[in-house]
């Protein structure tokens, strides 16, 4: 019986998780459509970029998917009177909930794999790829008829010709406030060198205004190169967010690696990594306590179902609220742990209590019998 129920619940768990993951992935991926439309991002890079966000979605989806799978499966057992038959056959409360506990344990183990290892790895790769795309000058410059500011350089391209030739270029170099330079050229190109990206202008002029006396000097050229600071496109120089760091780094990191103002938030993120997988067991305990602890009711299970869903939503909402409060006051971390452990302790205790069953009345509730 345990293997049969576990198999059914596991199959439902896979389909529910994939369904919720697809919906959330589609909604979140719309944020990156702009990169395809305006920056010429390829579909392959777009899929790679959005797929790196899936682990962060899964950490939230898995406990919720498990909750609804257990609610659906045990509610079906109650409606089909199978739970009554199992109890009348002498099965204990533990035997009835054992498949759910095993599935919750599997889900919790998957959650710890995600939060402790794969989430920081995938999110770091996501931020590096996103950072590289946003600072990919070839995609930025190839925007016809728009001004683009790149770390003090303002660039305008009238038209993009064949082989990505740039036509009608204007570059204003304001990186040195005391020496403002404007360059205009009929055509040019963007080159990548070992020293960094470089804009090569052809058949144009360079205009510079003397700040002291206001005179302007013009230099005509056949070919002129403008270097772009390489440091701004080096992902290694980024300040890593909390979700990119390992749990060990979140708990032990100190300035200057972590900003002084971020230490509390990083510590809270570390605690949240340890807590979030426990929601699988917490939500499972809520579902079991509400549905399995009681006996069959002819009035239906709608009230119990709504009560279970309400408890799950309250627990999830409190978890988010306590995390936000803990970022300002570290003592709220205790409330984060209590929010996830109390439903487990109370829920499992309430579930394991053998419900009081009136056997004659129970038999009368079976199909074909009268009370």
Image (spheres, rainbow, N blue to C red):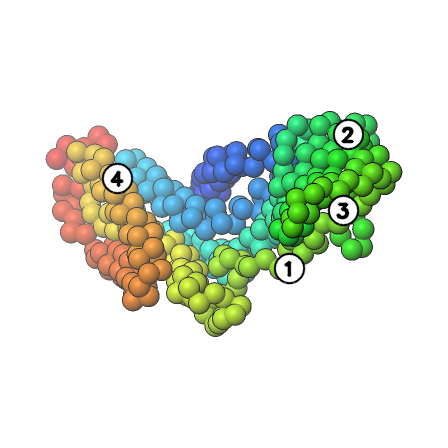
State left or right for residue 113 relative to residue 104: right
> 321 or 346, which is in the foreground?
321
Q: CA distance from mark 3 to mark 4?
A: 67 Å
Rendered residue at 42%/64% (across/down)? 261
| Location of residue 67 in the rendering, given as x and y in whole percent from the top left corner | 36, 46
> 247 or 301, which is in the foreground?
247
User: Would you name the residue on which mark 4 appears?
Assistant: 305
User: Would you name the residue on which mark 2 appears?
Assistant: 167
Give the mark toward the camera: 3 or 1. Answer: 3
Vertical order, 228 against 164 (above or below):
below
Counting residues from the start of the chain, the first of labels 4 and 1 encountered is: 1
Location of the C terminus by quadrant is top left
Q: What kind of element bears circle 3?
A: strand
| Location of residue 278 in the rendering, given as x and y in whole percent from the top left corner | 38, 58
Q: What kind of element bears circle 1?
A: helix
Counting residues from the start of the chain, the first of labels 3 and 4 encountered is: 3
User: Would you name the residue on which mark 1 appears?
Assistant: 236
């Amino acid at each position: 019986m345990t293997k049969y129920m576990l198999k059914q619940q596991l199959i439902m768990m896979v389909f529910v998780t994939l369904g919720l993951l697809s919906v959330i992935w589609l909604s979140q991926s719309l944020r990156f459509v702009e990169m395809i439309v305006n920056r010429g991002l390829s579909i392959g890079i777009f899929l790679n970029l959005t797929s790196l966000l899936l682990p962060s979605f899964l950490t939230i989806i898995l406990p919720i998917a498990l909750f609804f799978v257990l609610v659906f499966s045990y509610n079906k057992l109650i409606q089909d009177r199978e739970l009554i038959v199992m109890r009348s056959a002498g099965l204990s409360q533990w035997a009835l909930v054992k498949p759910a506990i095993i599935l919750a344990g599997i889900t919790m183990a998957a959650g710890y794999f995600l939060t402790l290892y794969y989430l920081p790895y995938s999110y770091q790769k996501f931020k590096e790829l996103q950072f590289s795309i946003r600072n990919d000058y070839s995609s930025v410059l190839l925007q016809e008829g728009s001004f683009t500011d790149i770390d003090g350089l303002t660039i305008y391209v009238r038209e993009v010709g064949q082989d990505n030739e740039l036509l009608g270029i204007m570059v204003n170099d304001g990186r040195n406030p005391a020496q403002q330079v404007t360059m205009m050229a009929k055509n040019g190109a963007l080159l990548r060198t070992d020293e960094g990206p470089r804009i090569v202008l052809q058949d144009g002029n360079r205009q510079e205004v003397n700040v002291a006396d206001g005179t302007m000097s013009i230099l005509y050229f056949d070919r002129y190169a403008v270097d772009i600071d390489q440091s701004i496109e080096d992902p290694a120089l980024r300040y890593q967010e909390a979700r990119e760091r390992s749990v060990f780094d979140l708990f032990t990191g100190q300035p200057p690696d972590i900003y002084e103002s971020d230490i509390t938030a990083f510590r809270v993120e570390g605690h949240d990594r340890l807590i979030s997988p426990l929601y699988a067991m917490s939500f499972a305990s809520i579902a079991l306590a509400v549905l399995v602890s009681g006996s069959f009711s002819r009035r239906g299970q709608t009230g119990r179902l709504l009560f279970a869903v309400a408890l799950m939503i309250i627990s999830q909402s409190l978890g988010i609220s306590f995390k936000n409060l803990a970022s300002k006051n570290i003592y709220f971390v205790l409330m984060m742990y209590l929010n996830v452990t109390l439903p487990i302790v109370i829920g499992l205790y309430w579930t394991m209590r053998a419900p009081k069953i009136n056997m004659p009345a129970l038999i009368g509730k079976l199909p074909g019998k009268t009370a």
